[in-house]
Amino acid sequence: MRIIQLLVISCILFSCSETNKNQAFTPGQLWPDNKGTHINAHGGGILHFQGKYYWFGEHKGSGEIGNTAQVGVSCYSSDDLYNWKNEGIALKVVENDSTHDIAKGCILERPKVIYNAKTRKFVMWFHLELKGKGYDAARSGVAISDNVLGPYTFVKSFRPESGFWPVNVQPYHLKPVSDTIKSTYCGGKGCLPAHPDSLNILGRDFKNGQMARDMNLFVDDDGTAYHIYASEENSTLHISQLTNDYLSNSGKYIRLFSGRYMEAPAMFKHNDKYYLFASDCTGWAPNAARSAIADSVFGNWTELGNPCIGKDSALTFYSQSTFVLPVAGKKDALIFISDRWNPKDHTDGRYIWLPILFEKEKPVLKWMDTWSLDVFANE
């Protein structure tokens, strides 16, 4: 109710009409859609297709139940990135079958949509936890549509890379696994009694598939798509190449930053270098962002430290990364997109959009109360 009242006041003062459109980003503020309602697309990603942007994200509710999927995945469209039209629910949860993988009440997080030019299909991936199972399932979900707006049809959920070793598998991964791994997920850091490699969590999950929680998708210049996800009890990141139809993992993947506990990954490319943003594992509480660089997806990745500078940089400006958006028609224009979570009222979660600057090869994020795409040069 408070959000609605604030949005009504905002629309009175600043106008939400078509004749008075937003012309700038205001990170951390309420962001009304075309109907004057705060955008409800959390943990999301953005697809640029045929001159228009499409924002897909978690439709959140209020209160404790707000972190479970009661509705599904929202979709919004925009011509300019400042003003967004509510296009409805792209993927609906299943209400009449409590045993369905995406039954109402499951946990469906960080949905991302990419377009496959070969199959002419729109493919959605997301992190899925089965209803009533907490965070033990650690699965990936896939849905597909002929139309960018949907509706998307659920295809499957699974744990990735069943029966495959990573390209950088080590000899100790082929040895017997430890029997001292805690059986349930406890969240954040400190869930494991020892380093994940000494426990050989990778080997434990070799047969049934690797755990996959916080995730993202990245499509390279040649059309090859990758699935980036937090795995091995959240202790290690995996980057997995997808099949040509984007519907499955190919079996080719790499382990990164074992024992560093990174989540909220967001991958992008700049000047032929590959980059990753990520965060520490601290639940809903913000922490210092992390960044890394590599010459190739399956190459050696090097951490670059916290990309944020200035006030509140140690808390990523009270947010957590979710996506990096290349702006169409502007050279080297990349936008860092993150969520400012509000677990007491998920509908009030705010969005932090900031331009990515570079100091040599290091990405830099500086806080701006307001900014526009004019900070980027035109191509």
Image (cartoon, rainbow, N blue to C red):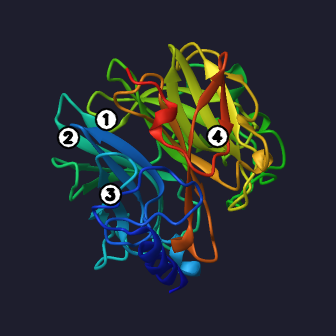
Q: Is residue 72 above or below residue 328?
A: below
Q: Secondary structure at mark 2?
A: strand
Specify whether residue 161 is in view. no
Q: Which residue is mark 3?
A: 76
Query: Marks 3 and 4, how far apart in space?
Result: 25 Å
User: Marks 3 and 4: which is nearer the front?
Assistant: 3
Q: Residue 344's mark?
A: none
User: Marks 1 and 4: which is nearer the front?
Assistant: 4
Q: Secondary structure at mark 3?
A: strand
Mark 1–mark 4 CB contact (< 8 Å): no
Mark 2–mark 1 CB contact (< 8 Å): yes
Q: Residue 246's mark?
A: 1
Q: Secondary structure at mark 1?
A: loop
Mark 3–mark 4 CB contact (< 8 Å): no
Q: Which residue is mark 2?
A: 121
Q: Position of residue 154 (x, y in %)?
A: 28, 56
Specify whether residue 27 is in view. yes
Q: Amino acid at mark 4?
A: Ala
Q: Secondary structure at mark 4?
A: strand
